[in-house]
Image (cartoon, rainbow, N blue to C red):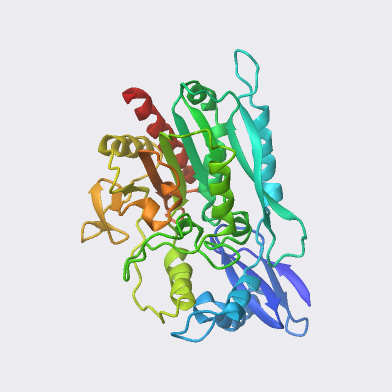
Amino acid sequence: DILHTYVIGRTALYGTVFKGIPLLTRLCYPTMVTMTISPARFVAGTALIMTTISSLSTATEAYHPSKIGTTGKPWGIDEYNIWRDTRQKQRCYLTDVVPKIQALSELECSHTKEPLFEVVRYGDLVHHGDEDPDKFPLYAVRSINWSEDKPNVFITGGVHGYETSGVEGALLFLSGGKAEHYSRHFNVLVVPCVSPWGYERIQRWTAKGTDPNRSFNPDGEIVEGRSFNPEAATDESAALITFLREEMGHVKDWTCHLDLHETTDTDETEFRPAKNSRDGLGSDDGKGEIPDGFYLVQDETSMKEEWFKAMIDSVREVTHIAPADTEGKIIGEKVTQEGVIVIPCKKSLGLCAGVTNAPYRTTTEVYPDSPNATPEICNRAQVACIEGALDHIISVI
């Protein structure tokens, strides 16, 4: 076979072969694309390239997540393995993310020249579906001079590994110049990439087919028909919970937790159909409306209206805020103020933002597929939200 690479518009396509069947999957941003084309069929020219893409797309239908398994029947171990083994590695956590995290240990206080943060390896995840036998190292970055006299702030990114600005935004907050200022007011703990397997494969789920942002309270209540329900614990959530309980167990009261996320077009085209297939719910012809813009997710047990307004006002300086739909909702949830929706208690739903007792807690949502957004804007929007959140807390405590 001959390997060729292509980029077509803003949508990058990746082709490979699984058990003799050509596959084609979408990447989130322009990148190099590898397609496997039979030498007998290959001739120069765009027309044949597009024909090959069309034929690959048809073959890929069998391994789109919504097509795996039997309609109306939940996945078994074979279906989970097919799903996992057909998710292609598209970027590298060890080269793209880890060096940026490790470099943060070199940040110094401008006055004392002492380190501001220390990098802690809090766990390891086993590779799945990869030839590399090593494990994913899991890292946290925390204030090196932790003080009982300061409020405690927790920031998480990459819980859904495919949501790139969650990872990059967390790193940019630490490296972007204001970290020293905020470290004077707060003890800061940042976990930039909770789910490295999902990061590498641009996937919402873990390698075991579980949504990590529903896995932080596996004993939570399941309500039939609710769009948010807890799922089983994952290696990713278990590692983070253990770290918070043991290594960070001296912190009894968290003040703030910001969990950085994105809402993408693939939420509707890939991940919701995948969930329906996985859970044996059958096909869903309805397609939810993806909000064009930034929004926040509020916990009904900790409303903090002024805090949310401060974050939205800060983000507005960087990017546009998501409008409500014709029913006055965003992603089907009630809007409490511009760019803010409210959901049930995040802890009961198994969301990462409910893993601590922080009264100031939220999930951010950036829309990277907007024609008015760029990766840089998305990263800056995450940072603007963090800074708006912390500035408000400084003003009131």
**Residue 37, picture quadrant:** bottom right
Quadrant (top left, top right, bottom left, bottom right) of the C terminus: top left
Looking at the image, the residue that sits furthest to the top is 111
| 103 left or right of 155 in image | right
Closest to the observer: 256 or 2?
A: 256
- For the point 43% across and 85% down, the residue is 72
In the image, residue 248 above or below residue 293: above
Judged left or right of residue 347, residue 50 is right
Residue located 60% across and 78% down the image: 77
Q: Position of residue 7 (x, y in %)?
A: 62, 63
Q: Residue at x 52, y 61 (%)?
A: 204
Quadrant in the rendering for residue 38: bottom right
Q: Could you tell me if residue 50 is visible in this image?
A: no
Q: Which of 13 and 138 is in front in this view?
A: 138
Asked if residue 119 lies left or right of residue 279, the reply is right
Q: In this view, does 18 lie above or below 258?
A: below
